[in-house]
Amino acid sequence: MTVAATATGPREETTGTPDLVRLTDVSIVHGRGRKAVVAVDGADLEIGRKEFVAVIGPSGCGKSTLLKAVAGLLPAGSVQGRIAVDGLDPAAARRANRFAFVFQEPVLAPWRTALQNVRLPLEVAGRDVRARAGRTPEELLELVGLQSFADKLPAELSGGMKQRVSIARALTLEPSVLLMDEPFGALDEITRDHMHSELLTIWSATGSSVVLVTHSLTEAAFVADRVVVMSPRPGRIKTVLRMPFARPRDPALKTSVEFLEAVNEIRAALEA
Amino acid sequence: MLLRVLRSTRVWLVLLAGVVVWQIAVTVLDLPNYILPSPVRVVTEFANRPLLYLQATLVTTWESLVGFGAAVVLGVVLGVLIARSRLTEELLYPYLNVLRVTPTVAIAPLLTIWFGRGFLPIVVVSFLIAFFPIIVQTVLGLNSADRGLVDVLRIANAGELQILRKIRLPNALPYIFASFRISAPGAVIGTLVGEFMSGSQGLGFLITTASGQLNTSSVFVLVVLSSLLGIAMFQVCVLVERRVVRWHPSVSL
């Protein structure tokens, strides 16, 4: 049913490839000297344009670290190997505003209203980036279904609403890659289920690729084109599984036999 | 109806009761005026020379405002420098701490020697007392900004100055206002100390002369006016705080 698509072996240089993000033999080391811990070991991965990739694995497998490395958020020197985003290294890609990040917590500025929070990246971006941005903050709030909450402060919003605001904020600068680190981890299960469909709707309306780190097998199988399965200590990419379900995906998919089979396959890969 | 009036005024009734007990005690025990004047005598003292007292209050208010204002400006600016620059923190913070633990009362005579009598040394004492809570809270507020929020701006390619303006300073505002609650009345105390040492007008100066003449009723008037000034400065800060940091849980929605 699925094709294990672990990317290894020789390949040509990045120019002219269809891949948006390309990780080549990436290792990440935390700390120095005797205290050094290898968080990620020899990861190879390609992410296509407008592809939705989920990264799953037990705690401590370095999946969040890998995400931070792609965003260029890790201290210089801790990342070995090659990370290319549209042919740029992470720092240059960040300067070109190719990324946006959604954290497990919504991390909204409590003194700004929902709309002002969505507008925040726009206020600090360079003039060229601002000119590029397509959707206005108002339109993005509408996209995540919060147009009537534009003037509410974060303290007046529910957990799911806050996370939707943070997703809208992440889309403000029209990123090529949306990096999501367990974005629904802090939500209750009912809200989370709802957010999965919501996220797919939002994603289909944008041109972004998504890399989503998660603990949830169902979440990974439902939202992703491909699921990257990682093993811990040191973090390694075990296998990559393709989710063969047609889009748009209906919530009813979650109860189908093929879906449960796919979830089981991910589980088997995790435990192997 | 009566109950509700009682409930909303009961704090003041305690004050009224206290004043009545005070008046009765002084009359019954027949205490001499220079030990403890009765409330009526204190009020009479104020009514006899209202202009003198109001003018002194104005002087002290002005000096306190200047001392407090200087403390706000310098406290926030130095707070930003210390919070955002390792070198400034390393070179400046220990000495600021030494200055802080040195009793201001001990420095005040020096200030008179250097600056002479009058406005300047008084304002400096006021500043010294108001300054430290502001700088400490500013540093705390700037550094306690949500790291995730800072990362959001970093990923959006924001510079440190933009992060300071958009995230760190707004985040520090509740902390800074909390310090004003200490510093604003502190500035009044500083001004009074300054006026004790080197004033020729103001509430603090009048307290030294009145107590020298054993004019205890006058001292009472001056003490009450000083307290009222401190409360007024405090309340103005709280009012501004409520308007500026309406979002903070301490103000509540």
Image (spheres, coloured by chain):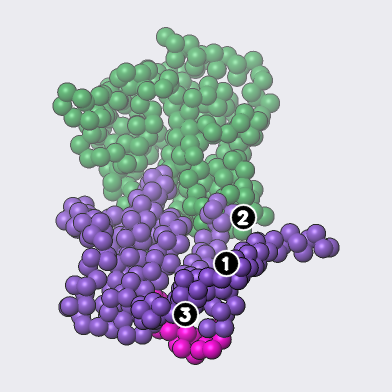
Q: Which residue is under mark 1?
A: B29
Quadrant of the rendered image containing residue A233: top left
Per the rendered image, the range of residues in magenta is B46-65
Q: Which residue is under mark 2?
A: B253
What SS does tag 1 mark? helix
Q: How far is mark 3 from mark 1, CA to CA?
A: 21 Å
Task: Establish if B30 lies above or below A178.
Answer: below
> In the image, what residue occupies the spot 32% across and 52% down?
A95
Chain at numbered mark 2: B
Residue B48 drawn in magenta: yes
Rendered colour, chain B: purple
Q: Which chain identifier belongs to the green chain?
A: A
Tell me the quadrant of the picture where the C terminus of chain A can be found.
Answer: top left
Chain at numbered mark 1: B
- Tag 1: Cα neighbours inside 10 Å, few (<14), some, or many (≥20)? few
- Tag 3: Cα neighbours inside 10 Å, few (<14), some, or many (≥20)? many
Tag in front: 1 or 2: 1
Q: Where is residue A102 in the image (x, y as percent from the top left)?
A: 46, 41
Earlier sequence position, callout 3 versus callout 1: 1
> In the image, what residue occupies the spot 46% across and 39% down?
A103
Q: Which residue is under mark 3?
A: B218
Residue A98 visible here: no
- Front one among B57 and B208: B208
